[in-house]
Image (spheres, helix red, strand yellow):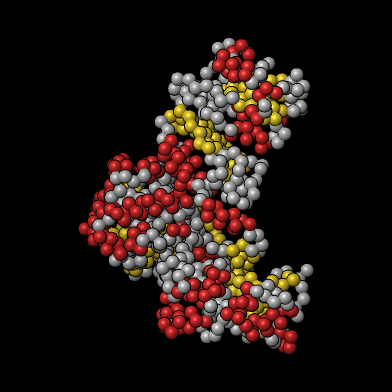
């Protein structure tokens, strides 16, 4: 039997990055599942986001994504480290596994998962606390951007406006976004940090048609104008003809035409 | 004698009023405007009418040209698709608001004004759409002034006020044609001292702050001063929102950004 | 391996000259690339045979890489490929009759190919263009002011500019340029000295006059079609 740890914390505290580093240091095989978490009064959770698993899978191609497994057959082999990511605002009431929220316990039972360790950002000192914030009120939304490709300078402007408060007070924003050159960028921002993190994923999409991999944006904050965010995003996305034009110019190699 | 040069008013009436008050306070009567009276801002008619009422000599900016020519003047200067969509919205809004009389006034504006050894243009002598940024290639900058036959070139369009002096220049070269059979003629020339003065922007500043900017030029001493003027920016922002323009314009303005992003390409020239 | 570029322009429908140039090029050893820098068409003769040959080279031809020139621009504008623009420059210079001659010199079937051509190429640190990056009709010649040459090189961000519009063959080499710049803005003053080392502008000629450029040695040769093997070449080191 391997290890199964439950890792929880508030938005932006660094759960996914801690999980990535832990997996990198683990000698055996690695397995991952992300639970949705539960909203509390004034504290809304993001529903069904796949950004974290797509990000981890890109860095760790052999990662076993337990969310895709047949639920009745989840079994943790020896030397396997299973990390269960859980977004959770509130501090657990008790230490160790006995502090697991009963609603989460119920979910874990359905999945036939029994964590033998539970760590929460802000409670357990072995986890970093730099970006662990105590949120009083938070609205959350995620937009599926599967197949969407951004005009790169428009993406820069939109992200700049988003994290600087043009669409409401954003505390946390993260996204996987496709660029016309086939790259997918991971954008990551938390109010406690000075700037955004921009990481290209390792996987590059072919220069034909629309990319099929996961693409999504998650925004959490206060007084957010989601309709305005959506309409601004629509203005930033490439239509078929413009995308085809970009892809054709990237494909033409030897000569670099002007204008 | 002192003269004032203003540019890029962008339908921002409170900013224009504040700048004209500052000019009056300095006792300056000679004012030249480098265009872009309209675009993005909420009071295009009021701004055009104030310029007309004061009899301020004005050359045509890229927005003034686009309002007349129906937006086909230069789409490719937008730095992003988002900026283009916002620009098109603002263009349509402005076209709908402007009276025919004010449109005719904008259409009648010259692309340049020459006064002695000074040339006044919106973007560059080549085009209302070309940006002369403060740190663009020094030889290209010198070429713009020298080829226009001026000693001092006044421009706007970048919304960043600056004064640039180009001095102690020289070029050495050799030249040969097909019939000169291998003889290459070596030549050299000293380049004249030339100056570019960018008046910044009254209605849409881009210098990190939110104050309106313009310049004062003394034609006896050739000294230039960049003036910064505070204005009632909240009045402008309220007016943007009430007029149905995108609220993002107000957010960008009050935070010291432009209404929409600006192209950074100093050498951009529309090829259409 | 020696790599040479043959640079041709201003054929204006003259298939015989093009064949002479192709024959010259067959005799030159090494890797060769043929660039046709515009003005494949003109009003004075039917251009369809030349266009057909450029699009469908025969087996012994060096395959041409073509861009559009001033005459193509006029035809495309007049044929509705440039929005509302028409061939005004041609109309002013040559009148309505020349516009009509141009329209009848090129079969409409070739218009889409002409419209697909690029404005210019950037190869290595060289710009290959009909006029200049400022305008397809920009005539750069021996008498062009040095600052204008520098501007056109800067716009393309290249060290060598091959141009054809003036129809002249010339070689202009900047040995050094220097200027001091003092910028004052709201953040203060900054002084800089800008120096530009060697840069070159080459007029490639037109029609029978064409240019051979040796990429490795940076050597330029001005040639005339059909004379290459008989008289040797005029060249610059």
Q: Is residue A207 left or right of residue A235?
A: right
Pick whichever, C157 or B20, lies toward us: C157
Residue C195 in view of the camera: no
Residue at x 53% of width, y 79% of height: C106
Q: Position of residue B152 (x, y in %)?
A: 40, 65
Q: Position of residue C112 (x, y in %)?
A: 54, 69
Pick whichever, A91 or B148, lies toward us: A91
Residue B72 in view of the camera: yes
Q: Is residue B234 left or right of residue A141?
A: left
Pick whichever, C179 or B266, lies toward us: B266
Q: Is residue C14 above or below residue B121?
A: below
Residue at x 72% of width, y 72% of height: C32
Q: Is residue B262 above or below residue A198?
A: below
Q: Position of residue C208 (x, y in %)?
A: 63, 84
Number of dots carrying numbers: 0
Residue at x 46% of width, y 47% of height: A235
Judged from this view, the residue extending furthest toward the left is B53
């Amino acid at each position: 039997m391997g290890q199964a740890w439950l890792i929880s914390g508030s938005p932006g505290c660094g759960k996914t990055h801690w999980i990535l580093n832990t997996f990198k240091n683990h000698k055996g095989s690695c397995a991952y599942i992300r639970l949705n978490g539960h909203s509390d009064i004034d504290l809304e959770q993001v529903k069904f986001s796949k950004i974290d698993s797509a990000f981890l899978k890109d860095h760790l191609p052999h990662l076993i994504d337990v969310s895709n497994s047949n639920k009745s057959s989840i079994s943790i082999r020896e030397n396997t480290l299973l990390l269960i990511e859980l977004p959770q605002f509130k501090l657990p009431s008790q230490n160790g596994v006995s502090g697991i929220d009963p609603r989460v316990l119920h979910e874990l039972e359905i999945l036939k998962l029994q964590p033998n360790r539970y760590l929460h950002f802000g409670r357990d000192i072995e986890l970093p606390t730099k970006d662990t914030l105590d949120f009083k009120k938070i609205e959350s939304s995620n937009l599926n951007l599967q197949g969407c490709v951004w005009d790169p300078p428009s993406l820069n402007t939109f992200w700049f406006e988003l994290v600087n408060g043009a669409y409401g007070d954003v505390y946390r924003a993260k996204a996987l976004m496709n660029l016309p050159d086939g790259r997918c960028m991971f954008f990551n921002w938390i109010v406690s940090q000075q700037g955004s993190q921009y990481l290209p994923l390792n996987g590059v999409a072919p220069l034909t048609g629309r990319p099929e991999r996961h693409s999504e944006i998650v925004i959490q904050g206060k007084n957010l104008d989601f309709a305005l965010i959506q309409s601004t995003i629509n203005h930033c996305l490439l239509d078929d003809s413009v995308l085809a034009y970009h892809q054709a110019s990237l494909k033409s190699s030897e000569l670099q035409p002007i204008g | 004698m002192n003269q004032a040069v203003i540019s890029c008013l962008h339908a921002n009436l409170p900013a224009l009023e504040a700048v004209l008050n500052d000019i009056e306070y300095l006792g300056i009567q000679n004012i030249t405007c480098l265009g872009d009276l309209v675009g993005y801002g909420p009071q295009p008619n009021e701004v055009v009418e104030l310029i007309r009422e004061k009899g301020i000599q004005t050359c045509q900016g890229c927005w003034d040209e686009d309002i007349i020519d129906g937006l086909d003047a230069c789409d490719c200067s937008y730095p992003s698709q988002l900026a283009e969509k916002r620009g098109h919205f603002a263009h349509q809004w402005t076209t709908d608001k402007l009276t025919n009389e004010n449109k005719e006034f904008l259409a009648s504006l010259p692309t340049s004004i020459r006064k002695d050894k000074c040339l006044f243009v919106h973007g560059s002598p080549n085009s209302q759409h070309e940006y002369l940024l403060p740190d663009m290639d020094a030889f290209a900058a010198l070429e713009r002034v020298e080829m226009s036959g001026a000693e001092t070139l006044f421009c706007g369009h970048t919304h960043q006020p600056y004064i640039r002096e180009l001095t102690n220049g020289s070029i050495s070269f050799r030249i040969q044609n097909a019939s000169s059979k291998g003889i290459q003629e070596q030549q050299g020339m000293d380049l004249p001292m030339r100056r570019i003065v960018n008046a910044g922007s009254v209605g849409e500043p881009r210098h990190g702050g939110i104050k309106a900017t313009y310049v004062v030029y003394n034609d006896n001493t050739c000294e230039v001063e960049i003036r910064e003027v505070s204005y009632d920016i909240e009045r402008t922002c309220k007016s943007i929102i009430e007029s149905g323009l995108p609220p993002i314009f107000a957010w960008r303005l009050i935070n010291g950004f432009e209404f929409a992003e600006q192209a950074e390409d100093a050498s951009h020239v529309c090829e259409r | 391996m020696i790599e040479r570029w043959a640079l041709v322009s201003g054929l204006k429908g003259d298939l015989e000259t093009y064949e002479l140039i192709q024959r010259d090029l067959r005799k030159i050893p090494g890797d060769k690339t043929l660039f046709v820098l515009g003005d494949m068409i003109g009003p004075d003769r039917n251009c369809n045979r030349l266009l057909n040959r450029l699009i469908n080279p025969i087996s012994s031809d060096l395959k041409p890489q073509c861009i559009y020139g001033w005459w193509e621009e006029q035809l495309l504008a007049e044929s509705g490929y440039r929005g509302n623009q028409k061939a005004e420059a041609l109309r002013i210079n040559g009148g309505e009759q020349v516009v009509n001659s141009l329209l009848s010199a090129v079969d409409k079937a070739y218009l889409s190919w002409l419209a697909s051509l690029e404005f210019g190429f950037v190869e290595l640190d060289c710009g290959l263009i009909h006029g200049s990056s400022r305008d397809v009709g920009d005539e750069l010649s021996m008498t062009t002011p040095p600052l204008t040459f520098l501007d056109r090189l800067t716009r393309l961000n290249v060290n060598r500019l091959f141009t054809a519009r003036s129809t002249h063959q010339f070689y202009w080499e900047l040995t050094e340029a220097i200027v001091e710049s003092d910028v004052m803005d709201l953040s203060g003053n900054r002084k800089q000295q800008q120096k530009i080392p060697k840069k070159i502008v080459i007029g490639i000629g037109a029609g029978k006059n064409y240019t051979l450029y040796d990429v490795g040695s940076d050597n330029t040769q001005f040639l005339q079609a059909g004379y290459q093997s008989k008289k040797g070449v005029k060249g610059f080191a």
